[in-house]
């Protein structure tokens, strides 16, 4: 992981650091995903079985997981893990319950004019739980629980075969209604388009690899999605008060997710940058997922800024998925941060806390999308309707405004729809006051 002492990455940050480091095979991915979507559209369950055998090397008889299989999974999972998954589920539920809006609020803004908002949960949502290189029971909790808290009636999950028992247990603890052993782009296509076994959903949430993310983006005209949530990103914004080993640990931890993951450190301290680099070398040497980490760190780098204010602006340009802040005045730094998926403040707040147990959500926008998107939360599973309720008196107050603007736009029927309810009084003599 090269230490960059110059500011020659500024342009990369402005153009999109994460995108620039992952842009190699976009066309190939698009062509492959297009073919998968069309195959699922045409052949339904048959396509899912064939694609599972092709990509996952598993021959399935059916795509849905039975209740017996879920019960068997509990026997295969360490009881201590089950207990800790339940602890994490409690924390996640508690935090997301804090986000619940009122189902309905109404306020009289003027006599006879009452306005408000009605919030309604979606009816059927699909959660994608990654598999492949690693099992992520935590993602089952992070996707299903917020949907349940939001009041979604039916929550389904798709995850690659063969399903790790811990993932099955986590999905069950979280409250999934249906579980399917389908992964990759074909799972996204199945949830969007529907097959003989899988009824289509209104929205798909959850992270995945480049193929899963591409499928979500390509099917947005058919199904709502949360946001692009691709390979993990870690960013550290720190000054000389940061512990180099702690910062290195966070960068290495996120790098172990995927070879396409990426990490950056932005600091005004050359001493810190060099120390973090040495710590990373030491940690990677003995890491169990060394090859993956090294591939990810090839996408990564350090930037030495002239000042912390400049470092903050660089980080705002990068808009990272995870942002660690360790500075002399972290709350002041926090106030200046505009773009980040999830923020971790202080030497003793590792990214892993949010990944698993604090209660915040680890499904977050990647590739610079934190500039415009929020991490997964209860609002993703609800929709809002505006409400207005007028009396005759209230409509009379608004009538001149409505009619004048409508007539200016040439929409005379709009004007008449008000006039018929509140006919203007016959003109009286004298001046208008």
Image (cartoon, grey):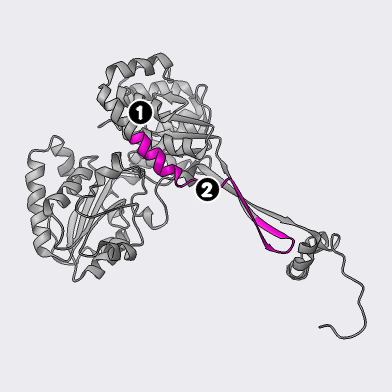
Tell me the magenta residue range: 88-115
Element marked by disc 2: loop
Q: Which residue matches tag 2?
A: 101
Q: Which mark is residue 194?
A: none
* Nearer to me, 97 or 315: 97
Q: Could you classify mark 1 by the number of other residues whose Cα lies within 10 Å: few (under 14), some (14-19), or many (20 or more)?
A: many
- Residue under pointer 1: 170
Residue 44 rendering spot, x and y as whole percentages: 49, 24
Q: Which label's residue is closer to the chain start, 1 or 2?
A: 2
Horizontal side, residue 332 vs residue 400: left or right: left
Q: Are marks 1 and 2 in contact (CB under 8 Å)?
A: no
Q: Quadrant of residue 420?
A: bottom right
Q: Is residue 232 magenta?
A: no
Between 207 and 78, which is closer to the camera in this rendering? Answer: 78
Q: State the image coordinates of residue 186 (x, y, percent, origin top left).
A: 41, 31
Counting the numbered discs, the total is: 2
């Amino acid at each position: 992981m090269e230490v960059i002492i110059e500011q020659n990455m500024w342009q990369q940050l402005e153009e999109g650091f994460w995108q620039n480091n992952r842009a190699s095979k976009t066309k190939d991915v698009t062509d492959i995903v297009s073919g998968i979507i069309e195959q699922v559209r045409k052949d339904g369950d048959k396509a899912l079985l064939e694609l599972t055998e092709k990509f996952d090397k598993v021959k399935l008889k059916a795509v849905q997981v039975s209740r017996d299989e879920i019960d068997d999974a509990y026997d295969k999972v360490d009881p201590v893990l089950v207990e800790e998954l339940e602890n994490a589920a409690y924390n996640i539920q508690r935090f997301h319950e804090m986000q619940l809006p009122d189902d309905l609020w109404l306020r009289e803004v003027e006599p006879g004019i009452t306005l408000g908002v009605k919030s309604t949960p979606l009816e059927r949502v699909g959660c994608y739980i990654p598999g492949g290189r690693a099992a992520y029971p935590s993602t089952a909790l992070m996707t299903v629980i917020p949907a349940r808290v939001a009041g979604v009636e039916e929550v389904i999950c798709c995850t690659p075969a063969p399903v790790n028992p811990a993932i099955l247990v986590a999905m069950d603890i979280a409250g999934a209604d249906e579980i399917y052993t389908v992964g990759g782009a074909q799972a996204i296509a199945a949830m969007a388009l529907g097959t003989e076994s899988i009824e289509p959903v209104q929205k798909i949430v959850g992270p995945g690899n480049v193929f899963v993310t591409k499928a979500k983006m390509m099917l947005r005209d058919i199904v709502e999605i949360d946001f692009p949530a691709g390979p993990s990103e870690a960013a550290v914004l720190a000054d000389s008060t940061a512990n180099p080993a702690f910062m290195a640990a966070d960068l290495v931890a996120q790098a172990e997710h995927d070879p396409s993951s990426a990490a950056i450190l932005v600091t005004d301290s050359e001493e810190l940058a060099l120390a973090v680099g040495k710590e990373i070398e030491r940690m990677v040497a003995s890491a169990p997922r060394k090859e993956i980490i090294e591939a990810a760190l090839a996408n990564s780098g350090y930037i030495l800024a002239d000042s912390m204010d400049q470092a903050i602006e660089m980080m705002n340009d990068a808009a990272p998925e995870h942002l660690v802040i360790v500075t002399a005045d972290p709350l002041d730094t926090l106030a200046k941060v505009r773009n980040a998926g999830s923020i971790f403040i202080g030497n003793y707040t590792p990214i892993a806390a949010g990944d698993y147990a604090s209660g915040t959500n680890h499904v977050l926008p990647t590739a610079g999308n934190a500039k415009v998107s929020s991490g997964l939360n209860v609002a993703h599973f609800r929709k809002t309707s505006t409400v207005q309720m007028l009396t005759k008196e209230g409509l009379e107050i608004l009538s001149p405004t409505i009619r004048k603007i409508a007539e200016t736009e040439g929409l005379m029927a709009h004007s008449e729809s008000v006039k018929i309810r509140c006919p203007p009084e016959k003109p009286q003599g004298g001046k208008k006051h």
